[in-house]
Amino acid sequence: MGKSKRSNWVADFETTTDANDCRVWLWGLANVETANTAWDVEHGIDIDSFCERMSKMPGVVYFHNLAFDGIFIIDWLFRNDYHHHEKFPVKREFTTLISNTGHFYSITVHWKSGHVTEFRDSLKKLPFKVSVIADAFDLEEKKGELDYHAKRPIGHKPTWEELAYLHSDILIVVKALRLQFAAGMTKLTVGSDSLEDFKKMLGKPIFNRMFPVLPESMDLEIRKAYRGGFTYADDRFKGKETRSGRTYDVNSLYPSVMYDRLLPYGTPIFREGAPEVLEDYPLFITSITFTAKLKKDHIPCIQVKGSGQFLATEYQTEILEPVTLSCTNVDLDLWESHYDMDILSFNGAWMFKGITGVFKGYIDKWMEVKANSDGGQRVLAKLHLNSLYGKFATNPNITGKVPVFEDNIVKLRMGPPETRDPVYTAMGVFITAYARDLTIRAAQDNYATFAYADTDSLHLLRDTDPEGLWVDPKALGAWKFEYAFDRALFIRAKSYIEHKANGEYETHVAGLPVAIAESLTIEDFTGGRRFEGKLNPRRVPGGIVLEDVGFTLPVW
């Protein structure tokens, strides 16, 4: 007899906010394949009834932010004599997939009834707030409002308003997931969905030949050159209220460099000493030991991580003592354009074959969907366009955390070492290198008015489009004019506020809750000023409560 098909469901918990009375007071559950209205949403008023319901059916159940709701489930399991198992749970056991940074991917429970339920995080499939999903997918359901702190004693009968809030949250995620599943996006994360789609388009045998699994030691050497986006507040304007300006964003930055840049493939060869660009191996990743001094009127673009001499988040203007870094030929060309460098030694290089256009069909497909669709289909296209590149550089070290029950509370401890095969790290290394190169060179071309950059954006202190910058609202890789501002304050990377010409503020401060940001003005930006309203999770008996820990603006 074959196994019965597992159904997909969406669930949600409403919980108390009292650390001394932490519990689920309302839960909801709806089938992804069939639910359309509030009448299709089941509900109950305690976690006992939820787990009883789960134990009667095999299925995959999605929570939007499993890191929160999952703690309530794990707490219940421990209290009801279930035990955690590393890999393959049997009856009255469960296993978890939690990253070393505490990101929850799944909880799989083998109930005493014999059924197995896998809880997954829909946030890994739809990386947006529920309110954003509702708007982006153009759904009739909208995120409601709820007084989370109202007193709701055990046995509280939910009001119509409370049920309506729960039903909307669930149906929004149900309808978005249904669209993803219909498009064949059934993997655990959207990145995995995109990689699978690309493999199918290219052909898996071709993919495996072009992007072989490299040995762990080789992958570790290549990974040393992997860096993120360029985010920088220029020292000339930092911490001072500026004049008017304009902001520009690249249309699909990462897909644009994937589209036509020379990218690596195949098994690299190692060359001792300095790299030599060869016709068959035009790309390289090298280790260099060097000193450097920033050229006059140039933007710094070298970060030194893992050194006690330098702050890892700062771009250096002068490196007096020799440092050793790994970089691509793309990075090295950029660095030598911006710095007077004294390369003391080349410590060997991995030489790669190069190819252009390998992603062209994939990007053309999803750019066309994006251009000719709206609502959910447009969102899916954007997810596919922006999620693929990072999957190539997935870290093979997947040592995660495991839950334990100590002091009547669920805690997370590091699990045993675990690894998996890398995908093809060099691809992620070169894509991000080209993306940084594009942004930094565009900023340098506009040095006189450049004030701030964040990965794919430029903030320039000028009132007209700059010469030499390709400006187009839709073209792949062009700079799109976003908005004009008449005043601004750039504090540091990931921290700025702009007063837009339409009278609204654009505020970005890393870690600052949106509810606080929406009320701030430039005059409110005083270094060290503290605001109430930043909520952090704290695990307590029963589950999690959110505590107001406040937020302090950075000092400059």
Image (cartoon, rainbow, N blue to C red):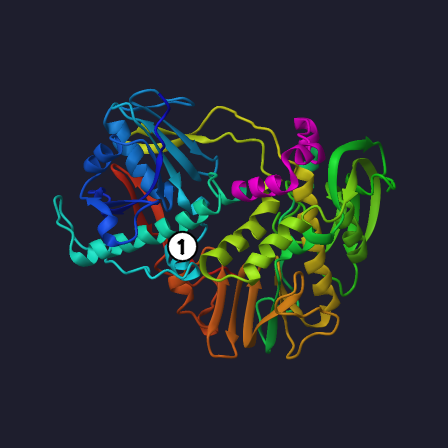
Q: Is residue 344 visible?
A: yes
* Up/down of 342 relative to 474, above or below: above
* Up/down of 280 relative to 168, above or below: above
Write the residue at 40% across / 62% down.
138
What predominant SS class does the magenta segment belong to? helix
**For numbered disc 1, what is the local secondary structure?**
loop
Residue of label 1: 129
Quarter of image, res 250: bottom right
Write the residue at 20% across / 35% down.
48
Q: Nearer the viewer, residue 106 or 208?
A: 208
* Residue 527 in the image, given as x and y percentages of width and height: 48, 64
* Up/down of 520 relative to 231, above or below: below
Amino acid carrying mark 1 in the image:
Lys
Quarter of image, res 60: top left
* Residue 542 in the image, given as x and y percentages of width and height: 25, 37
* Up/down of 88 relative to 74, above or below: above
* Residue 522 in the image, given as x and y percentages of width and height: 48, 72
* Residue 412 in the image, given as x and y percentages of width and height: 39, 32
**For the image shown, how many numbered marks are present on the structure?**
1
Q: From the viewer's perspective, is 414 left or right of 93?
A: right
Write the residue at 68% across / 26% down.
215
Q: From the viewer's perspective, is 164 left or right of 232?
A: left
The crowd level at tag 1 (other Cα within 10 Å; few <14, some 14-19, many 20+) is: few
Q: Nearer the viewer, residue 373 or 382?
A: 373
Region rendered in magenta: 192-220
Q: From the viewer's perspective, is 293 left or right of 12?
A: right
Quadrant placement of the C terminus: bottom right
